[in-house]
Image (cartoon, helix red, strand yellow):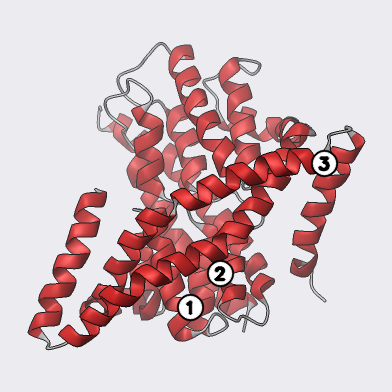
Amino acid sequence: MNASNFALPAVVLIILLAGWMRRVPLFDTFLEGAKEGLSAGIAVLPPLVALMVGVGVLRASGALDMLSFALTPVAALLGIPREVLPLTLMRPITGSGALAVFTDIIRIHGPDSPVGRVASVIQGSTETTFYTIAVYYGATRVRRTRQNLPACLTADLVGFVMSAAAVRLLLS
Amino acid sequence: MMNAVFGGMLLMGVVVGALSGRMPEVSEALLNQPGQAVELTLVLLGNMCLWSGLMKVAEAAGLSQMLARLLSPVTKRLFRGLRHKGRAMGLITLNVAANMLGLGNAATPLGIAAMQAIEKEQRYPEDATEDMCMFVTLNTASLQIIPTTAALLRAAAGSKAPMEILPAVWLSSATSLMVGLLAVRLYGGVLRRMGR
């Protein structure tokens, strides 16, 4: 047994215990949240259709292979498998786009293959950088974001390299 | 941005497909992919219901506030230009707590409110301040303790151990977060030295 098998049940248990101790009506509150989750989930469908068609066409035409092939030297230098490069290009730009590329990768290579594992760790350990910066600064009167974007993109790049390294280190 | 991504992908796909004689495959993708998107949404939908429901319970039980209190020694050190007990600092810790729990729906409005509170406290600067950059960087890094979406999609794709990625995810997101925060300080220093 390893600790990661306990993480999910433990989080569920802590939440339910805390709710029970504070006398939160567990079932009613759960349903209220679940309904919000349902509408948020349905709202994801239209962008997902658009981006999965885009990714599908790009892969079927061979353009994705060409792009990955062109970037192979960079990937090799950073220790990132060539097959996950489309994910690293998509991840900072769009959440649903990354989701589309990610499902594509684990369907083709298998979730437990080295490529599938690196893609999973990247998907789990990074966020949509451009969107966040746009939304957060959009709410303010700030004109210049100074070092923010370069700093975040540096963090993303390190996250990609580290994801591949962590899979080599911890999962093989 | 998204217009360029969407249009670019389709245009490039069709042009490359025509040149390489792979139009049958491209047509097939156009027919199949929308259905795949629906399948993916169906897989995600149950998961989103479950976690939104659980997180509603967590919020009602005051878990985000508890987590926020636990985090305050760290947040105080990160945001050197903000009052320790100010409104901005409170919103920041709540946003970070929501992010750690994977409460995306709650984290974004809290984050926007926090940005506006920082802006007000720092008298509406034209340029992003270091505290703003720190805060946005915290939000572009993944703080989520359990990456449920990635694990779920692994399970749906037939993984034997969907959760085995957890330690690797923690290592990778912690490293990338540290680098991001350091980069904010470092690049900020460089910009100042250049007189900007």
Residue positioned most to the top? B123
Residue B153 left/right relative to B14: right
Quarter in which the C terminus of chain B is drawn = top left
Q: Which residue is mark 2?
A: B153
Depth check, front residue: B71 or B161: B161
Mark 1 or 3, closer to the camera: 3
* Three-letter amino acid code of the residue under disc 3: Leu
Q: Which residue is mark 3?
A: A26
- Residue contact between numbered discs 1 and 3, judged by CB atoms under 8 Å: no
Q: Can residue B79 be seen here?
A: yes
Q: Is residue B171 above or below residue B52?
A: below
Depth check, front residue: B112 or B120: B112
**Residue A48 spot, x, y in % from top left:** 38, 59
**Do the residues at discs 3 and 2 belong to one chain?**
no
**Residue B5 spot, x, y in % from top left:** 24, 57
Q: Can residue A69 be seen here?
A: no
